Amino acid sequence: EQAEDEGETAGNIGDCLEIVGLALPRSSLAPPAQLLWLIDRLVGDEFSLLPTLARLQEHGGYQAEHWLAVATLLEDRLDILDRAAAKGQESVRLGRLVDILVFVYKQGGQADKILPLMEREVERLGNYRQLVELLVRSGRFDQARYWCKQGFARHMDDAPGTAAALQQQLCQMAEHEGRIDLVAAYKAQDFFYRPGIDAFKELKKAGEKAGCWATIRAGALTHLETGQRLDIVSKKGEKSDWPLPPPEAAFPPERQQNRWRRSYPQYEVLIDIA
């Protein structure tokens, strides 16, 4: 399970195991049994050593009815793993099985089952990004926005990188819908969370499109100089002239301020901007 290298050992073992993909279609097992034989081992393959189902399909030429038979059996196994995951067990295997079942549904012409499966398992597995991407490709933006916000709230503390990616997906949807002020609001969040010249340029581009760059620029520079956020309503309820709407998902201001224990003025960024 360990190797003192950069993955060469695992890669070499994987190359040796390519023969599995050649041997299975020539075995005496019926086609659905061949697929299930590999799936049983893929679910437990922690190091991705075995050939994938896609590789097996290249060699075996399996038909839709073979995949349909496999899907029925995997659904029963998924129910068993669901119950185990609810008790805090087998969540890793559950995630692998869901990914495999998505592939099997595609091959068997049952793509309509993929979204219900993903929505059913997303809160247990936390694979919000994958679900949102699927919903966006299907043109279901309201559902995609809902799951983005749910996933952001869940991962904001334990996986801020995932939360930031979901926030970026919300920004992309706003851009697709032509909501330029909301796009600028997300760019402002990026700038406040990670102030730098690149984030400032992105904010400038969005602010100019929204027609309020002068006000946004003043607020951005004020933040770099003093740490004050003009986009946040004060505790006294005093409103500023910040022209952008609140984003649908945002890290708490104190989280952003304390992320790198910043001190103000932020001289390096101010000099870069100047």
Image: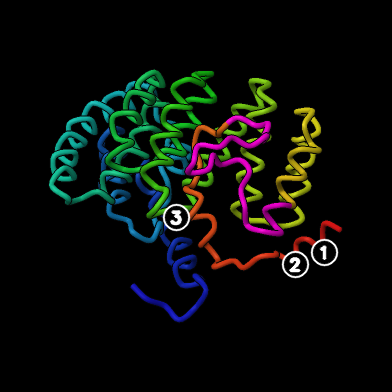
Residue at mark 1: 271
Task: Out of 225 and 45, give the one closest to the viewer.
Answer: 225
Q: Quadrant of the C terminus?
A: bottom right
Task: Out of 229 and 125, give the one closest to the viewer.
Answer: 229
Q: Is residue 23 above or below residue 258?
A: above
Kind of residue at disc 2: Tyr
Give the main secondary structure, helix, strand or loop, of the magenta stretch: loop
Task: Out of 65 and 125, give the one closest to the viewer.
Answer: 125
Kind of residue at disc 1: Ile
Q: Is residue 192 left or right of residue 55?
A: right
Residue 59 among those drawn in magenta: no
Q: Residues within 10 Å of mark 3 (few under 14, many from 20)?
A: some
Residue 241 among those drawn in magenta: yes
Q: How much space separates mark 2 and mark 1, taking CA atoms?
A: 6 Å
- Residue 217: give x, y in percent of width and height: 77, 44
Bounds of the magenta span?
A: 222-245
Q: Residues within 10 Å of mark 2 (few under 14, many from 20)?
A: few
At horizontal 30% and vertical 41% (from top left) the residue drawn is: 97
Residue at mark 2: 267
Of the image marks 1 and 3, the number of the one nearer the N terminus: 3
Mark 1 residue element: helix
- Which dot marks residue 18? 3
Q: Answer whether labels 2 and 1 touch (C-beta < 8 Å).
A: yes
Kind of residue at disc 3: Glu
- Residue 30: give x, y in percent of width and height: 26, 34
